[in-house]
Image: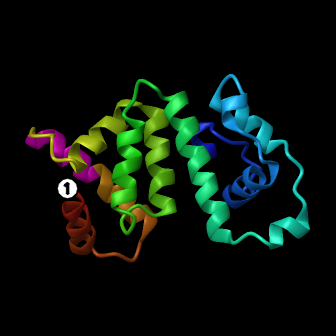
Amino acid sequence: MYLLGLIKPDIKVSELGDKALQSGYNPEEYDSYIEYVNAVENYNLDPEKSNLTTEEDKLKKAMELAVGVTIEKYENLPVQEFCLAVGENTRYFTETKIKEIAKLIQLDESNISRILNYINGTEKDSKQIQSIVDTLMEIEKISNPEISDKEAYRDIIQLRK
């Protein structure tokens, strides 16, 4: 999330979720979701309360914040649809792959639409499809250097509806 400028680089994802849960802050009390996340980031954790919350609950809350602030920050992009695609393909979209995709989006915001159009099957141009497959192959190799090209290609093809 910090790769997209959504959270401070020194805050761990689970820590952000923990802060959101402990703070009790309500996003509707802020002018923007980004202001809400900034307030959460500055909240001081109670270590005893942290021990009472599961890592899974912390991560779920952090993802809720990430989706909200991403949708607000990139309102002209299909972020919500992309998040749904990630949610539908959790086996494929590892944290490393999401970080690599975030880097691509920072370089060119249209990459989110290109990848989404590949996943949902709306991209019909064979050159565009091959370009996206090549990009996803690079991401696959970064994420899992031991994977064979055949396995990586199979995973990428299965991602497409």
Q: Is residue 20 left or right of residue 80?
A: right
Quadrant of res 115: top left
Looking at the picture, the colour scheme in use is rainbow
Quadrant of res 113: top left
Query: Percent from the top left, x then y, of residue 90?
Result: 39, 64
Q: Across the whole image, how many numbered discs are drawn on residues?
A: 1
Magenta residue check for 2: no
Q: Give the secondary structure at mark 1.
A: loop
- Camera-side residue: 52 or 104? 52
Amino acid type at image mark 1 = Arg
The secondary structure making up most of the magenta span is helix
- Position of residue 72 relative to residue 60, above or below, is above
Query: Percent from the top left, x then y, of residue 149?
Result: 25, 70
> Where, quadrant-wise, is the C terminus in this rendering?
bottom left
Query: Percent from the top left, x then y, of residue 100?
Result: 47, 51
Magenta residue check for 129: yes
* Residue visible at 23% across and 41% down in the picture: 117
- Position of residue 109 relative to residue 157, above or below, is above
- Camera-side residue: 50 or 111? 50
In the image, the segment drawn in magenta is: 126-134
Residue on which the image places disc 1 = 160
* Residue visible at 82% across and 73% down in the picture: 51
Q: Is residue 130 left or right of residue 79?
A: left
* Residue visible at 36% across and 34% down in the picture: 78
Query: Percent from the top left, x then y, of residue 1?
Result: 59, 47
- Camera-side residue: 153 or 51? 51
Mark 1 crowd level (few <14, some 14–19, many ≥20, 10 Å Cα): some
Q: Is residue 42 left or right of residue 6?
A: right
* Residue visible at 74% across and 54% down in the picture: 21
